[in-house]
């Protein structure tokens, strides 16, 4: 059986829990909710939280977003997952809020979490599942924008976005 690894990116702790930069982790929670009784457990050797069943591993790094590469690479090595079987769930500034797109390989589009993963894996050949958060308003710094909570309107649509992204992740895995 070929093992697949799905990683939801975000920053740890309650301070960041409902921010745009944690959208990947929110989608991971939706994937977990679709598996009765599934919950993440700390995997100390890789600095991640992991759920594993059969050939599927769902994981969330316990590091800050910009340092995601080390934990993802450690997980891939520990569970012997080939890079092309890794799906990374992440927020994307260059897509409108609510859009979802899976793409194998490619660049990081300025996303420091993806940059860290590419460097640690030594390849770009993993799947990126981008979840659109849109561009910041006016001249707001993108780094500040991603660390802000979703607007009230976005929060109303967030469950739909997470469900759509989880559906796309499951499609990619099959």
Image (spheres, grey):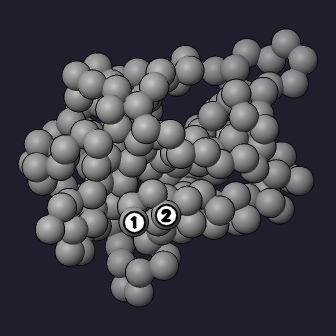
Q: Position of residue 105 (x, y in %)?
A: 41, 31
Label pair 1/2, CB-CB below 8 angstroms: yes
Q: Position of residue 13 (x, y in %)?
A: 47, 47
Q: Which label number is shown at residue 171?
A: 2
Residue for point 53% across, 45% down? 102
Residue at position x 35%, y 38% in the image: 126
Residue at point 80% right, 25% down? 136
The answer to whether residue 15 shows anywhere in this view is no
Q: Quadrant of residue 117?
A: top left
User: Residue at 21% across / 68% down in the picture?
Assistant: 55
Q: Residues within 10 Å of mark 2 (few under 14, many from 20)?
A: few
Q: Which mark is residue 174?
A: 1
**Dividing the image into 4 quarters, which one contains the C terminus?**
bottom left
Q: Position of residue 70 (x, y in %)?
A: 23, 31
Label 1, secondary structure: give it: loop
The tag on residue 53 is none
Alpha carbon separation for disc pair 1 and 2: 5 Å
Q: Is residue 118 above or below residue 7?
A: above
Seen in the picture, residue 95 relative to 5 is either above or below; the reply is above
**Residue 99 visible in the displayed image:** yes
Relative to 135, 54 lies left or right: left
Quarter of the figure with residue 142 = top right
């Amino acid at each position: 059986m070929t093992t697949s690894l799905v990683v939801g990116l975000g920053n740890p702790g309650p301070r960041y829990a409902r921010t745009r930069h944690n959208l990947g982790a929110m989608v991971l929670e939706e994937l977990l909710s679709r598996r009765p009784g599934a919950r993440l457990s700390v995997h100390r050797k890789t600095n991640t939280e992991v759920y594993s069943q059969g050939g599927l591993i769902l994981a969330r790094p316990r590091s800050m977003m910009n340092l995601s590469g080390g934990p993802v690479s450690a997980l891939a090595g520990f569970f012997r997952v080939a890079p092309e079987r890794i799906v990374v769930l992440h927020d994307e500034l260059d897509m409108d809020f609510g859009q979802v797109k899976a793409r194998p390989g490619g660049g990081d589009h300025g996303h420091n979490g993806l940059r860290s993963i590419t460097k640690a894996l030594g390849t770009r050949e993993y799947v990126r599942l981008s979840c659109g958060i849109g561009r910041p308003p006016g001249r707001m710094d993108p780094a500040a924008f991603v660390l802000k909570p979703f607007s009230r309107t976005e929060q109303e649509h967030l469950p739909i976005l997470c469900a759509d992204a989880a559906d796309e992740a499951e499609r990619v895995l099959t």
